[in-house]
Image (tube, rainbow, N blue to C red):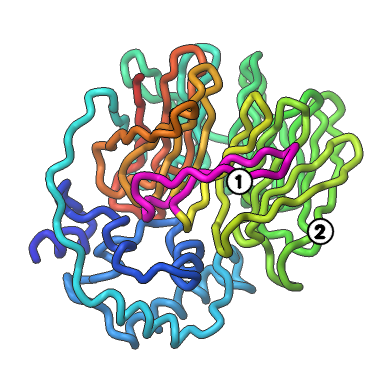
Amino acid sequence: MASLLAAAAGQQRATDPPSRAYLALLPDGETKRGFIRDCTGCHVFDARIAFPGGAPRSIESWEERIGSMHARFGRGSGFPIIADPAEPKALARWLASALRQPARPVAEPVVDSRVREYELPVAGDLPHDLMRDADGRIVITGMFTAQMYLLDPRDGSVETEAIPVPNANPRALHIDPDGGWWVLLGGPGMLAYRSPIGTWTTHNVGMYAHSIARDRSGVWVNGHFTGHPSLLAHVDAATAAIRRVEVPSATAEGVSPIPYELRTAPDGRIWMSELHGNRVLVTDPATGESRAYAMPVSHAGPRRLDVAADGRVWIPLYTVGELIALDPASGNIARYPLPDRDALPYVARVDDARNAVWVGTAASDALYRLDIASGVFATIPLPSRGALVRHLDVDSATGEVWAAYGASPGTLSARVARIRP
């Protein structure tokens, strides 16, 4: 009981059950997948939520919780990331019935010497994206503080740089080979560019965008909540000209498919996932034409995908506990179940040099590394309980991996992790 109370107070211990242990209490099926997609993407689902104060919630308590979250993040809100539940009362009864007994404490995790965490100067910030620059520093977007962090792995020192835009809300990041930063500013609906000498310029893309994909001529962004149609925008790096591309929606009128990750393929096409649309799309920049690929399971919640050098698209199925590889030429899908089906795979990044795929999760406090040749996963435990891994960056030269923890709200102070091979 003391352990559960500590977790409910936001002071989790290493032996407290991870989020996946609470998700494992829920019956498998479409209801569970829909619940996971909508209710676990920003924060971990742990004792604080499932058993506040160490006691199970009543049906009435779950109804109040569901109603509160939908009022804040459902359709018609300023940040509509949650789909409307078909039957809120039925969902409350389902949760109350499944979550009667708390998950059991777990053994003290084995410390992995390959992993080191670095805390950021502002404990309450949310490190959304991160990427290495040419000097080996790790550049991190501070979503809540409107600033950038520059972490030097050699001594662990961290510098900060404010973004000269009010309420910048930095999310996605791309760093050019010459050292220029492209930073997506969600709230203002802008794409910002910081030159190698530190000069900032902005481009008004006119939408709350989620991700960035760089091509030869500029940068693509996607409207996070645009729905009918969904929108992509391209900013020409040389001329600053903005071009918009419409993508037919996969959801009902007024409901956004929640466009998510963007990645550029070796052939120059732009891939995008849709969290609620339950599909991925590829767009030809030259023609603006798109083709969609449906996921193999309903409510699969495809999140932060990546494209390998051979053109295969690696997609984490968030609610299913699988990593899949889509071959665009044939449309065939290979499925790779994670070691724990309730891990909630959030982001995938391909290491082409080592024929591997790294997977960051929202519920297992671990990273997984798939050896593509053998189809076998290795598990790398992370030091902290509640480590929702929102973003990964892989160094192709060394195989080193950096992870940003991005739970909101979370039990951890803002931090990133370094995983050495």
Rendered location of residue 335, percent (x, y): 52, 45
Q: Residues within 10 Å of mark 1 (few under 14, many from 20)?
A: few
Which quarter shows the C terminus?
top left
Rendered location of residue 231, percent (x, y): 78, 52
Rendered location of residue 90, percent (x, y): 44, 86
| Magenta region | 321-344
Amino acid type of the residue tagged 2 in the rendering: Pro
Please name the residue shown 76% across and 57% down the image. Answer: 230
Please name the residue shown 50% across and 70% down the image. Answer: 30
Q: Secondary structure at mark 2?
A: loop
> Mark 1 — residue?
166
Query: Viewed as shown, does residue 124 lie left or right of 178?
Result: left
Amino acid type of the residue tagged 1 in the rendering: Pro
> Mark 2 — residue?
248
**Marking on residue 368:** none
Q: Please tell me whether residue 331 belongs to the stretch shown in magenta.
A: yes
